[in-house]
Structure formats: structure tokens, C-alpha cells
Amino acid sequence: MNPKKILVTGGAGFIGSNICEELLRHGNKVVCLDNFATGKIDNLLPLLEKHPDAFTLQVGDIRNMEDCRRAVENIEYVFHEAALGSVPRSIKDPITSNDVNVSGFLNMLIASRDAGVKRFIYAASSSTYGDSKSLPKVEDVIGKPLSPYAVTKYVNELYADVFSRTYSIECIGLRYFNVFGRRQDPNGAYAAVIPLFVKKLIAHESPVINGDGEYSRDFTYIDNVIQMNLLAMETENPDAVNTVYNTAYGERTTLNQLVGFLKEFLSEYDKEIANVEIRHGPNRAGDIPHSLANIDKAKTLLGYNPQYSMREGLKEAVKWYWENYNRETMDLPSNTK
């Protein structure tokens, strides 16, 4: 890659910090904008130490237009990862989810437009498919949203489309499908299923599966997501911009299968984990029963070639958690690798 000036919003988060790391590895100058509502400074400390001249941290909030304008000064590319995730969080507090995910998104689009940003690459979501029962999910066939979070992510796509048509700013949306991997936080009320289950199993506690465990997801390892983001930035194909892409592996795994894989991989480090009992609870409001991506569009227009299957990525993630997880405090250490 030729060195570029890049802004990553939400760069202290799980996905954002991994994108920052990869961009810096390629010699780019990177600005991270984060308010640490869900991101962690520990995700950035190694990057700040290793790249003092190329990496800048700006503490700010995308709901504040002045913070947005300051962050995009002299920026060529924006990776907009900042958002309040979690379907349950949005159901509990739809107003805050809307403020961050819609108003904050619009602020960033306006600031980027006014600063002359070349391309705006943003985290979209598979939740946009809503109640559509078709499988695999194809980009131009969606249903009605099933949660306030899904509404906000669909509105992002609508705004990006309008801005690309009206103001000629290039926009690419990446519909993430259940991303997992290193640095994904296992703690908090809205922890994602994989790190939460890993935490439970390491502690020899029973994970609780919502429903009968036959809901399925297209679990997607972080390195595949990083590849998609870089391809979205690098593409010079005019047909590849101003659109959205499924960002996934294209493989479906049930929650029961997921727990089986986790127990298999974690048992390599602690044989007792194989005997931990699994419990089941009620289905969760707003959950889509099945999710599976068709990734042909990304392969054709971007040259996407995901390197990690779900099992391969899960084995890497389990190894990372085992090496970095503090089994005494049940937390990640203060300086994760």
C-alpha cells in the first residue's frame, strides 16, 4: 500500500484497534477517534508505543460535530467503526443507540464531506436483513428490522447512499456477520457470545445458550474482516464503490456446534473444560434465527478471499484468550498483545 492519512473512529474497540494495527503495519499515518464508551485504552497502548510518529489518539465523541471536524483534518480515508453495538442494548435504550449510530454517523459523513475525504468506509451490519428468511443472505434482498439497533444500521446505509449520490463522496458499507477474535471483550452486560462463552468455560462455569441452540450464525474471524476493510480502501474499481458488501466467511454454525468447538479447543489447555455442563435459556428478543452470507459480490468486485474458516479462526481466538486471559481476576490483562 502507498502510505495514506487515515481516520479510524471507534479505533479503541475490538474491530477498530485491529484495523488501526494493520494500517500502521503498512506504513500509514492513522488517527484514532474514540470516547472510550466501549473501547479500551489498553487496546491502543502498544500501538502508541510502537508508532509514536504515525499514530495519533484523539479523545472525542462522534455526537460532537467539532470533534468530528477536528478528526478529519487532512484525512484521505475514514474507517467508521464507532457505534453502540448489541441488539439487547438497543432494545433497553433505543434513544442512545440512535444518537450514536444515526446522529453520530451523520456527523461523520458531513465532516468527511466538508473536509474532502476521498472514501468513507463504514461498519454496516447483518442485522439489516431483519426478518428476511432467505438464505444465504444476498446484499439486495433485505427484510424488516427486528431491533432498534438494526434500524440504525439500515439508516446508515441509506444516508451513505444519499451522500454518495448527492455529494460525490465515495462510500462503502461492510455488513459484518458476527465478528470474533483477539481483543473482543468477554466482560460487560453486552459481551458477544464467543468471548462470553470462553470466559465461562475457562472458569468451569456453565454457559447459557439462548433457546435450543439450533439458531445459526456466520461467525467471521477478525482477520477476514481486516482483509475486507483494506480491500475496500485500496480498490480502484469504479463498480466497487458506493455499495454494501457482506463481510463474512460464508459458512453457518449453530450455537450448539460453537460450544462443542470451544470445548474441544479449550480442552487442549485444560482437560476439565470438556466436562463443563451447558445450560439453555429462553430465546432472546430481536434475534434472527439464522444468518448465512453470500460473499460472491465481495469476491467479484473486491477480490475478497477469506483466509480463516470459522474453526480455524476460533482456534486462533481460543489460543489468544488462553495466553492473555488472567484466570485469577477473570479479566484481560492491562496491556493486551
Image (cartoon, rainbow, N blue to C red):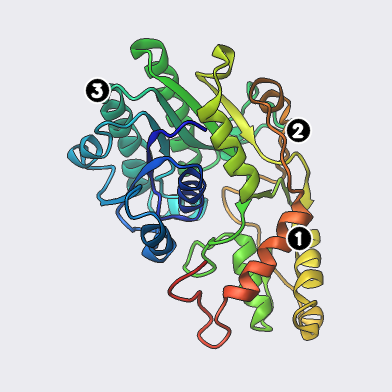
Q: Nearer the viewer, residue 195 or 151?
A: 195
Decide: is 58 above or below 43: above
Res. 274 image quadrant? bottom right
Residue at 81% across / 82% down in the picture? Answer: 275
Q: Label 2, secondary structure: give it.
A: loop
**30 lies left or right of 154:** left
Task: Indicate which disc residue 136 carries.
Answer: 2
Local crowd size for mark 3, using a 10 Å CA cut-off: few (<14), some (14–19), many (≥20): some
Earlier sequence position, callout 2 versus callout 3: 3
Position above or below: 30 against 321: above
Percent of width and height locating residue 182:
58, 61
Left or right: 66 in relation to 253: left
Label 1, label 3: how far apart the Cα atoms are: 45 Å
Give coordinates of residue 43: x percent, y percent. Answer: 44, 62
Camera-near label (1 vs 3) is 3
Residue 189 location (% of width, % of height): 47, 66
Looking at the image, which residue is at 54% across and 61% down?
184
Q: Compare residues 249 and 115 and report the one nearer the observer.
A: 115
For label 3, the residue is 114
| Amino acid under disc 1 | Leu
Badge 2, how many Cα within 10 Å: few under 14, some, many 20+?
A: some
Categorize mark 1 by other alpha carbons within 10 Å: few (<14), some (14-19), many (20+): many
